[in-house]
Amino acid sequence: MRESDQPIEQSSPSSTHLARSILTAFLLTFILARITVFLIMARKIPDLYFYAGGTHIHHLNYGIFLLSAVGAWLLLKRPAARNLTIAAIIYGIGMGLTFDEFGMWIRLGGDYWQRASWDAVTVIAAGFALVAFAPSIRRFRPHHWFTAILLVIIVALFFYLLVKTYRYAGKTIAPKLHNMESVAPK
């Protein structure tokens, strides 16, 4: 059989490609979930919440089901090539839905706008971004170390300013969000 007659095998995507797929799906899901909830609470769109027996089923539950399903699929079917990318995207969506309401894990019944959810999403997105875009430690060169140190300083400054902003927003915006949530569909 000639080399040109052999069937072409689809290669599995790299871990970098999968991490980028997860990161993109995670961030888009988080953003869409936040926008949708805000629009429902502001009564700009209809109440799209799912109710079972009068109980509002939060979207973190959809995320848990997606994570469970993709975990079973990865363990039992061991997909490859394109299906592995699809699994990564579903995983990212499940993570976005679940961690958007991370604050509710800690304080069951707490309000939707808890800081813990934002913090969790930030940390997870940063982890996915490192896996997706950073070279391996073995391949670090001096300019990588300089960039890493500079990045740590910038991130520390960012979090310092973020905390100050949250404090300000907590005093000015939080009462409006709590009021909107109190009159929103339950």
Image (cartoon, grey):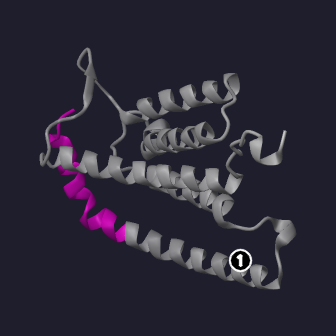
Residue 71 higher or lower than 135, as above or below = above
Relative side of 131 to 91, left or right: right
Packing grade of label 1 (10 A; few <14, some 14-19, many >=20) is some
Q: Main secondary structure of the magenta part?
A: helix
Task: State which quarter of the image contains the C terminus.
Answer: top left
* Residue shown at the point (27%, 27%) measured from the top left: 50
* Residue shown at the point (24%, 50%) measured from the top left: 38
The image position of residue 141, as x and y in percent, is 83, 80
Task: State which quarter of the image contains the N terminus.
Answer: top right
The image position of residue 72, as x and y in percent, is 62, 24
* Residue shown at the point (55%, 79%) measured from the top left: 157
Q: Quadrant of the rendered structure where residue 10 is?
A: top right
Residue 115 seen in render: no
- Check the image and name the residue furthest to the right: 138
The image position of residue 171, as x and y in percent, is 29, 65
- Check the image and name the residue furthest to the front: 2
Residue 88 seen in render: yes
The image position of residue 81, as x and y in percent, is 65, 41
Amino acid of disc 1: Ala
Q: Quadrant of the rendered structure where residue 54 is?
A: top left
Q: Is residue 181 magenta?
A: yes
Q: Is residue 77 magenta?
A: no
Q: Nearer the viewer, residue 166 or 82?
A: 82
* Residue shown at the point (18%, 50%) measured from the top left: 179
The residue segment tinted magenta is 167-186
**Helix, strand or loop for disc 1:** helix
Residue beneath disc 1: 148
Q: Nearer the viewer, residue 92 or 146?
A: 92
